Amino acid sequence: MPGTSTRKPSSRAKATAPATPAEPAAPTPPVEPVVERFDIVEELAVDGGEPQPIVLFGVEADVRRKFTGAEAAVFHGHLAQNRVREALDVITDGAGQALWDATKHLTPEPVARLLNKVIALSGLNEGELRPLSPPLSARMAGAVRSQAYADGMASISDKHSENSTGETADD
């Protein structure tokens, strides 16, 4: 075809091109393998099924039975700090205060029994709450007032008791 060149470029043209010096390649840092870590907190997770509907003195609530490890840790943290209402909030999606208020007319022992049942339904705690009562004496060194005392469910007397002589009423 006219005007078309079929000539191949000469290898001489390549040889005359100025050569650029090869720069040394920077060493690539070794790639650290991705380590899959097991989150140990997930050992606290519970999968107990669908929520359990309950009623306590007219207060209706659903007790959750599925918890992530992190949710279970929050629950146990509340119990460790004697924040029972907050722990109940975790397992009932916010009905803790209403459940707590529904039991104010009872003494600490039945309150503990009822709330232990609610907690047992969640599957989060295998132990038992101790009765929610104030310290035996307001004058105990280091004694902390319980949540039951703070909510008016229990009381302590300002009247000093007599020192014990070790005698009983029959003596």
Image (spheres, rainbow, N blue to C red):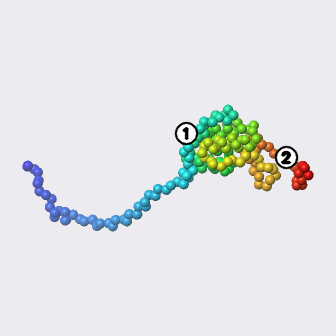
Which residue in the rendered view is the most extreme toward the top?
Answer: 58
Q: Secondary structure at mark 2?
A: loop
Q: Is residue 81 above or below residue 23?
A: above
Earlier in the chain: of badge 2 and badge 1, it is 1
Residue plotted at (13% across, 58% down): 8
| Kind of residue at disc 1 | Glu
Image location (x, y in percent) of residue 64: 58, 41
Determine the image quadrant of residue 105: top right
Query: Are the two marked residues, 2 and 1, in contact with CB atoms closer than 8 angstroms?
Result: no
Left or right of 75, for residue 131: right
Visible in this render: residue 168? yes
Left or right of 20, for residue 115: right
Q: CA distance from mark 2 to mark 1?
A: 48 Å
Image location (x, y in percent) of residue 77: 63, 50
* Of the pair 159 and 14, the residue shown nearer to us: 159
Residue plotted at (67% across, 48% down): 128
Residue plotted at (63% across, 44% down): 120
Q: Say few, some or many: other residues with alpha carbon within 10 Å of mark 1 (under 14 / 14 to 19 / 20 or more).
A: few
Image location (x, y in percent) of residue 86: 65, 44
> How many circles with numbers are drawn on the protein?
2
| Kind of residue at disc 2 | Asp
Residue plotted at (47% across, 56% down): 36
Q: Say few, some or many: other residues with alpha carbon within 10 Å of mark 2 (under 14 / 14 to 19 / 20 or more).
A: few
* Of the pair 125 and 87, the residue shown nearer to us: 125
Q: Which residue is mark 2?
A: 158
* Mark nearer the viewer, 2 or 1: 1
Visible in this render: residue 150? no
Left or right of 26, for residue 49: right
Left or right of 60, for residue 168: right
Which residue in the rendered view is the most extreme toward the right?
Answer: 171
Q: Which residue is mark 1?
A: 50
Q: Secondary structure at mark 1?
A: loop
